[in-house]
Image (spheres, rainbow, N blue to C red):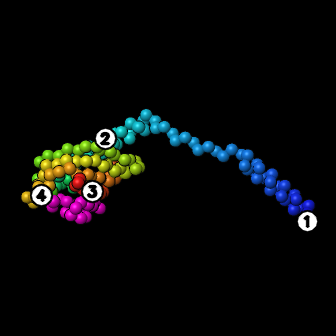
Amino acid sequence: MKRKFILCCISLVGAASICVSQESPSPSPSPSPSPFKTLRSATKEATIAKLEKSITDAFKNKQAKAFKDYLAPEFNAIDAEGVKDADAEIEDMQKTDLSNYSFADMKVALLSPKMAVATYKVTTQSTSSGRDMSGTYYAATVWNKRGGKWLAVLHTLVKAQ
């Protein structure tokens, strides 16, 4: 019995020393993006930035059909007035006069090949239902690519303090 115990201890120490002495695989360095992958990402980022401008132009010009074509069926917008669906956004469009806008600090995060988030600052000159709404706002839009077309799923806008 004593002999089995000693043999078991020696085996355990031997196995432990083998396990400890083995090199753990070093984490592979994250691959640097290939020029092609970087180009594709830059192209997608430029595409999303262009979409932000296009959808804002459609809103500014009160082009309801063109505006709605950029929206996913489950689209929601969140602002100081609450949560709105696409139809409520189009109603707001009809009451809003957006005379001028400019984007700044736009960043596009590609979450997957079919999902992107654009964040930016927008300065506007606008009125809504006769009230001056001009100012600087922080905005974010979540875009999802479906059937080869990017659609806005969520948009949020908050006035800067």
Residue at numbered disc 4: 128
Quadrant where the C terminus lies? bottom left
Q: Could you classify mark 3 by the number of other residues whose Cα lies within 10 Å: few (under 14), some (14-19), or many (20 or more)?
A: some
Asked whether 131 falls inside the magenta stretch, the response is no
Residue 95 at x, y percent in the picture? 11, 59
**CA separation in Å, label 2 and label 3:** 20 Å
Residue position for label 1? 1
User: Residue lying farthest left?
Assistant: 130
**Contact flag, marks 2 and 3 (Cβ < 8 Å):** no
Extreme residue toward the front, this view:
161
Front residue of 64 and 138: 138
Measure the alpha-carbon separation of dots 3 and 1.
Answer: 74 Å
| Camera-side mark, 2 or 1 | 1
Q: Which residue is mark 2?
A: 46
Comes first in the chain, label 3 or label 1: 1
Q: Quadrant of the N terminus?
A: bottom right
State the SS at label 4: strand
In the drawing, does residue 118 fall left or right of residue 58?
A: right
Percent x, y of residue 146? 34, 53
Three-letter amino acid code at disc 1? Met
Q: Nearer the viewer, residue 151 or 96?
A: 96
Q: Residues within 10 Å of mark 4 (few under 14, many from 20)?
A: some
| Mark 1 residue crowding within 10 angstroms, few (<14) / some (14–19) / many (20+) | few
Tell me if label 4 and label 3 are in contact, CB under 8 Å: no
Q: Earlier in the sequence, mark 1 or mark 4?
A: 1
